[in-house]
Image (cartoon, helix red, strand yellow):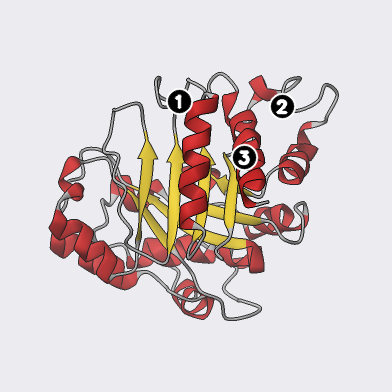
Amino acid sequence: MGEVRIGISGWTYPAWRGDFYPPGLVQRRELEYASSRLTSIEINGSFYSLQRPSSYAKWRDETPDDFVFAVKGGRFITHLKRLREVEAPLANFFASGVLALGPKLGPVLWQLPEALEYDAGVLDAFARLLPRTTLEAAALARRHDDRLSGDRVHAETDADRPVRHALEFRSPSFASEEALAQLAAHDIAVVLADTAGRWPKVDRDTSDYRYVRLHGDRELYASGYGPAALDQWAERLRAWSVSQDAFVYFDNDVKGFAPHDAEALMERVGRSAD
């Protein structure tokens, strides 16, 4: 049986205080609290800027032993460089502390901008640079450039573990059979993204696990998931878990639905597994 991980995209949302986060809970304990209720969380700060090894180590230490993080790849790679000539930026990303998560490192998410269309050559070159084990990631990290130095660098791993990658594309051009076959050939999971119809919603198995991002089924980032929708997702997860791991993250955070929907889905999946 595969393992199902359900959680949220990020955890620092002021509007959740006094709702999901109990009144009086200090901000520095929000990750500890969220990780006690959920089984995985996406680290989103890594998308906006390189984080510090000390931050990754702190997040590792504040969460339960069996917890797993997904880490969002940097927008410098995906949005500014647009996947081209990214060996040094990739080295910097993995040197910035990702490996300090140790056994809590889950999939690495690469989210592409809508304007970035499929190019077989660009995708192939990018995919070939991605490390597939933590030893490969550490070797890549040691090739970081002078943007990082001293305590900003963590280029070690305590063990050799697989490193999984997932791609969330927003251009319909990636939904072609050629692109999907190429992603499968490189063992990169296609993110099944529910975006209220804004971007492609592609349910295709291209790796040994499934990755889902739920941004809202009626209103992007804002609407909650009703009982019928959660029942359907629970059934889908149960079918996948017969043979695959699955990671599901709620990103409908604007009105605070994300953590509650995640807990409701966890309850359904647990109930269906009993």
- Tell me the residue at 57%/30% (across/down): 258
Q: Is residue 139 above or below residue 100?
A: below
Tag 1 residue: 221
- 77 or 216: which is nearer to us? 216
- Tell me the residue at 73%/23% (across/down): 17
* Residue, far right: 24
* The image quarter in which residue 23 lies: top right
Tag 2 residue: 20
Q: Secondary structure at mark 1?
A: loop
- Tell me the residue at 25%/70% (across/down): 185
First in sequence, mark 3 or 1: give its number: 1
On the rendered image, what quadrant is the N terminus found in? bottom right
- Mark 1–mark 2 Cα distance, whole angstroms, equals 17 Å
* The image quarter in which residue 215 lies: top left
Q: Position of residue 232 (x, y in %)?
A: 47, 37
- Tell me the residue at 65%/68% (across/down): 103
Tag 3 residue: 268
- Mark 3–mark 2 Cα distance, whole angstroms, equals 19 Å
Front position among marks 3 and 1: 3
Please name the amino acid that badge 3 sits on: Arg
Drawn side of residue 163 relative to residue 188, left or right: right
Please name the amino acid that badge 2 sits on: Phe
